[in-house]
Image: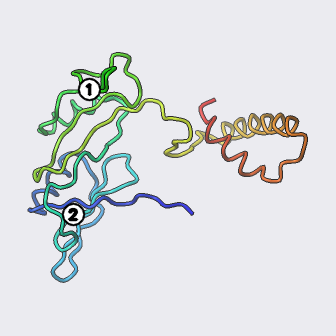
Amino acid sequence: MDMKLEVVVLPVTDVDRTKHFYKALGWREDADIEFGTSRVVQLTPPGSATSVHFGTGITDATPGAVRNTYLVVDDIEAARAELAGHGVAVSEVFHRDGTGAFAPGPHPDRGTYASFASFGDPDGNTWLLQEITTRFPGRVTGVTYASAGELEQALKRTAAAHGEHEKETGQYDEDWPAWYARHLVEHQSA
């Protein structure tokens, strides 16, 4: 069964101030709903499938208690510059060195998963930007094809690879749809 992370709840003191802060970053407003004495605001970062909720009557956590929630970007320096351009106090870019300690600047090789920057909202909930340029195998955010022709070519490559798989095992693969799905996801950019 799929279980998708949909919402992260942020504890805040001033709902309108927080709403203004995140909207100024370009986050999409999905909802601002009042239920009696409770209020729920939902905003979504650009390109994200996961949103944040904050408001009144939705959490008893201390404002500012959410720490180092990751926001994945494909260019750490551009993301940092964009946040700074919105007036956000964002850290300089940093990375982990060979000992695991934090060091200034982006990772020397610009290795994926290796460069960071951080910022906080008005209550002190903190965010960690992480540069990911190539995902580890099995980590997929979505499989898309630009055209029917591109999908057709991917299916042909997958069919050929599956034929080789069946030759190696020497038997018909009854679970071929699952094999195809894994192969299409793992080799999308091929």
Q: Residue at x 90, y 45 (%)?
A: 171
Residue 64 is left or right of residue 131, and the answer is left
Q: Which mark is residue 165?
A: none
Q: Residue at x 17, y 48 (%)?
A: 24
| Marks 2 and 1 close (CB-CB < 8 Å) | no
Please tell me which of labels 2 and 1 falls first in the chain: 2
Q: Mark 2 falls on what kind of element?
A: strand
Question: Given the image, on which type of amino acid does mark 2 rest?
Answer: Phe
Q: Is residue 168 above or below residue 21?
A: above
Q: Quadrant of residue 105?
A: top left
Q: Is residue 125 above or below residue 154?
A: below
Question: Given the image, on which type of amino acid does mark 1 rest?
Answer: Ala
**Residue lying at the far front of the rendered structure:** 99
The residue that disc 2 covers is: 54
Residue 118 is left or right of residue 143, and the answer is left
Nearer mark to the viewer, of 2 and 1: 1
Quadrant for the C terminus, please: top right
Q: Quadrant of residue 150?
A: top right
Neighbours of disc 2 within 10 Å: few (<14), some (14-19), many (20+): many
Residue 150 is left or right of residue 65, and the answer is right
